[in-house]
Amino acid sequence: MHSPDVRFIVYVFFFCSFILPDQTRGQEKAYELLPSPDMWYNSVDGIRIGVNFVGQVPGTFEDGPHRLNAGVWLGLWFPSMPVSYQLLYTEPVPGWSEFGSEASVQFLSSIRTGYHRHGAGFNKRWQPGFQENKFRELNIFNTFEKRFNRSYTAFPALWSEDSKILATAAFKMQDENFLGLYFFELESSLQYLNDSFIVSSLTAFQKIDLNRHWGFRFRAFTGVNSSASAPEYLYSRSMNPAIRWMNNGVTRAKGTIPQNWIESGSLHIAGGANIRGYMHSDVKSFVECENEVELCSSLYHSILSFNAEFDFWNPVDALLNKNNYASEFLRFRSYLFYDTGSSTGWIGDQPAEIFSNAGAGISFSLNIPDYLGKSRGFVLRYEMPFWISDPTNGNSISFRSLFGFGAVIAF
């Protein structure tokens, strides 16, 4: 695609975004398309400008029929594919839907940051009345996926460029027991194009509040990949598998976070086994293995872990709690943590070594829930894993520093 043609496409989208909506003001509309400008950055596209669109029946506020979320962008460094897009269309199934308990079909398509993803699926949610914190959800999807440009990735060795067709099923449940709020998720995917493989994970959370400032949070996680699994699905000790990095705009492409920060091992991406004190040694392994995943000693086909956090009082959170409005959206946590886990040895000949760490941390979160009570916001963390059981270099007890995005125990 030539640059003048690309510029013409972008001009058309910006015209539709800012000029055409004015033509329908004062008129009754059967459908509305709400545009908003967007700008982002990565090291391949450079500055990426574009438009996001939300399509809906007027007055339905994100829960009506014919819902559309879409975007189109232009990379101003004009790489080989400068135009990218994403589209998600949701259509409720009226006979199986009621307030808070919608059934829907979805169609998705995206080509961005060097990755294809196209497919369709079915979702069903069960919720008692207005109790958004108690629900069950079933998601079934079939997608075609392919990494066609590894230049966008922070660690190319963690990615294959094979085409994949994935059938995925996930079940989520959140409710309360005698201890407090708990959450459970089971997800499994079958890749059945050419060399087939299976990826499965099980996650469980339990929250125990003693009061507003003191309490416990527990998490158990296990993940299993069959022997032929692509490297982006394999587990490290400390963070999310590479495929999960695609779910967040901050980590989706190389350069949004400076690469030297990523390679320092001081920036933690929550998820997976989440034995966070091993972030430095895991990242060092990914840098050293370059483009050969077989040389990455810190990748596992199966892993089992347990994470615990103990919240305690701090003056910043106490101050936020004095403002009823601020306390609904803002939280400043201080906590001690302990993580432990091991490769299970279920797949291949990987040794079942046990890795553990302990430390302290603080986090700041902003959360503005959607109409279903789902989180919309961010979490920033600073953590000090002052003890690890098996240090690569140095002593088990030492000062270590991590900055992080997201929270692994996300209540």
Image: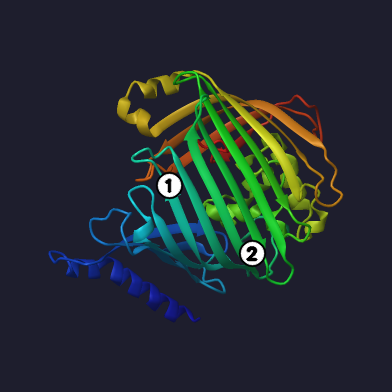
Q: Which of the two marks, 2 or 1, is nearer to us in this view?
A: 1
Q: Which class describes the residues within 10 Å of circle 1: few (<14), some (14-19), or many (20+)?
A: some
| Furthest residue toward left | 26
Q: Is residue 285 above or below residue 7?
A: above
Give yes or no for contact between labels 2 and 1 (Cβ–Cβ under 8 Å).
Answer: no
Tell me what residue is drawn at x 74 percent, y 51 percent.
286
Is 360 situated left or right of 70 in this image?
right
Q: Is residue 249 visible?
A: no
In this rendering, position of residue 127 left or right of residue 293? left
Residue at the far front: name it.
Answer: 95
Q: Earlier in the sequence, mark 2 or mark 1?
A: 1
Residue closer to the observer: 218 or 51: 218
Between 140 and 306, the one nearer to me in the picture: 140
Task: Please name the residue that numbered disc 1 is placed on.
Answer: 126
Which amino acid type is shown beneath numbered disc 2? Answer: Ser
Query: Where 161 falls versus 401 (above or below)?
Result: below
Q: Which residue is mark 2?
A: 151
Q: Residue at x 38, y 24 (%)?
A: 320
Label 2 residue SS: helix
Relative image position of residue 299 (x, y in whole percent): 76, 49
Task: Pinpoint residue 14: horizontal percent, then vertical percent.
Answer: 33, 69
- Crowdedness of circle 2 by 10 Å Cα count: few (<14), some, many (20+)? some
CA separation, marks 2 and 1? 41 Å
Image quadrant in which you'd find residue 144? bottom right
Q: At 43% across and 63% down in the image, what residue appears?
A: 105
Secondary structure at numbered mark 1: strand
Residue 142 percent location from the top left of the image: 56, 65
Does residue 367 appear in this view?
yes
